[in-house]
Image (tube, rainbow, N blue to C red):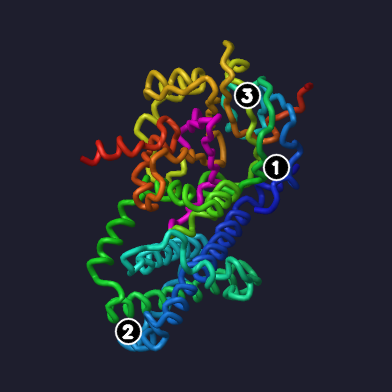
């Protein structure tokens, strides 16, 4: 009986889930990633609210949401999700650190109220029917994007960012993928609070790095330790957090790999990947059989004290993210990049 | 997502056996693990994953199995398999 009820409401539940997801994400990116930054820039006098007003005067008004009403519910939700992705990419572009020495820990944590509720930016209520909520999201998203557009314009106009920096950042964001995984790992190595959030809440935590968290189920993070080494596989298909980390290594889809790694994990690592682990280290294979998409958090290599996050990220390969390799040693990195 | 514990029938540390067949369940339980016993190692709750499938599956657990018990041999390495609760039955100690 329970199954019948679920099937009957399956479609509706689905829309509800998507709209809830957009509401939560949109408010997160606005109140945690963009607006605290705007306030931060204003407070420091880097870019004031008056600069924004001036920039807005130069920008043509956005077109009214002309054909939104013509879409069916599903089309409108999909448009919202695409708009949200655009918004997230835009925030990534607008969040280049203009200084020569980017700080390791996000400097707007205080401004966005992570430590003190008093600083938190209020979020709207999301009540009403599904249609009302979609209409509100469409309106909000238009306004949020407008502010972002004005901010970008003002950053350029005032010379806080140059067009070249922006182009570089755009290219960088387009080529991410495995690099996202490397950045997540590097941040976890230098920031214990981030690591804890990552292990406990997965996707939610990565938004702090301006990485879109994706929507494929739940992210599981398996941490390697002195006595445990993790490997990820999907014996049923090729489940992987693609939406977050890009493509896994090519052999991840290979049935020979899947078959061998579950039957003989230690032998497969040793013979196929030349990774020989001492008997004191347990090898644990995570078969991504359902809605948890796993990634490995490798151990930080020795000899990397004082390295910047960016340097550390270069030690993390896609193989390390599935656990068929450890993070590179500094010497190996030097060899690879020579 | 809320505390996953609230929705779960099993607890971390419970010994469970995977059903041999489950015609009503979803197909996300690989053949090699059916009929085997393991220990629940973490609880994930009900996971909404609308991009992969409509509807919501029963609560999901990670269950740990020694490789040696699944495939024979002396290996003490482990397999962690994510299994929905409708595929699991309590197993004796």
The quadrant in which residue B70 appears is top right
Q: Which residue is mark 3?
A: B65
Q: Which residue is mark 2?
A: A60
Label 3 to label 1: alpha-carbon separation: 30 Å
Quadrant where the C terminus of chain B sits is: top right
Label 2 to label 3: alpha-carbon separation: 62 Å
Q: Secondary structure at mark 3?
A: strand
Where residue A75 sits in the image (x, y, percent)? 47, 62
Q: Residues within 10 Å of mark 3 (few under 14, many from 20)?
A: many
Label 1 to label 2: alpha-carbon separation: 52 Å
Instruction: State which region is magenta.
Output: A211-239
Left or right: residue B30 compared with residue A259: right
Residue A33 vertical position relative to residue A64 in the rendered view, above or below: above
Q: Which residue is mark 1?
A: A3
Residue drawn at x 35%, y 66% as measured from the top left: A96
In the picture, the disc for residue A130 is none
């Amino acid at each position: 009986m329970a199954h019948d009820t679920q099937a009957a409401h399956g479609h509706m539940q689905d829309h509800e889930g998507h709209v809830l997801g957009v509401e939560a994400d949109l408010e997160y990116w606005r109140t945690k990633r963009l607006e605290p930054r705007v306030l931060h820039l204003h407070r420091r006098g880097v870019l004031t609210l008056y600069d924004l007003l001036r920039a807005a005067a130069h920008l043509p008004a956005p077109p009214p949401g002309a054909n939104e009403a013509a879409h069916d519910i599903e089309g409108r939700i999909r448009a919202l999700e695409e708009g949200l992705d655009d918004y997230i990419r835009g925030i990534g572009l607008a969040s280049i650190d203009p200084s020569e020495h980017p700080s390791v820990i996000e400097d707007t944590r205080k401004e966005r109220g992570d430590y003190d509720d008093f600083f938190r930016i209020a979020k709207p209520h999301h009540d009403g029917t599904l249609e009302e909520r979609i209409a509100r999201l469409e309106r909000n998203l238009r306004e949020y994007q407008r502010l972002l557009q004005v901010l970008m314009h003002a950053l350029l106009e005032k010379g806080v960012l140059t067009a070249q920096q922006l182009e570089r950042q755009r290219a960088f964001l387009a080529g991410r993928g495995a690099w996202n995984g490397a950045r997540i790992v590097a941040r976890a190595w230098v920031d214990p609070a981030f690591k804890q959030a990552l292990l406990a809440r997965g996707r939610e935590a990565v938004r702090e790095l301006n990485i879109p968290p994706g929507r494929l189920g739940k992210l599981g993070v398996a941490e390697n330790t002195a006595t445990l080494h993790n490997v990820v596989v999907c014996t049923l298909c090729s489940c992987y957090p693609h939406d977050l980390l890009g493509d896994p290594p090519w052999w991840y889809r290979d049935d020979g790999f899947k078959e061998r790694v579950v039957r003989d994990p230690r032998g497969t690592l040793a013979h196929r990947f030349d990774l020989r682990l001492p008997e004191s280290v347990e090898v644990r294979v995570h078969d991504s059989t359902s809605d948890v998409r796993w990634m490995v958090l490798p151990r930080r290599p020795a000899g990397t004290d004082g390295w910047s996050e960016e340097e550390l990220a270069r030690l993390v390969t896609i193989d390390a993210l599935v656990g068929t390799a450890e993070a590179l040693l500094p010497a190996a990195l030097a060899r690879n990049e020579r | 997502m809320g505390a996953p514990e609230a929705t779960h029938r099993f607890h971390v540390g419970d010994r469970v056996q995977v059903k041999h067949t489950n015609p009503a369940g979803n197909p996300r339980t690989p053949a090699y693990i059916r009929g085997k016993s393991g220990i629940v190692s973490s609880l994930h709750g009900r996971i909404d994953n609308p991009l992969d499938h409509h509807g919501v599956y029963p609560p999901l657990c990670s269950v740990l199995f020694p490789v040696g018990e699944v495939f024979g041999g002396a290996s003490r390495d482990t397999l962690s398999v994510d299994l929905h609760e409708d595929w699991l039955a309590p197993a004796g100690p």
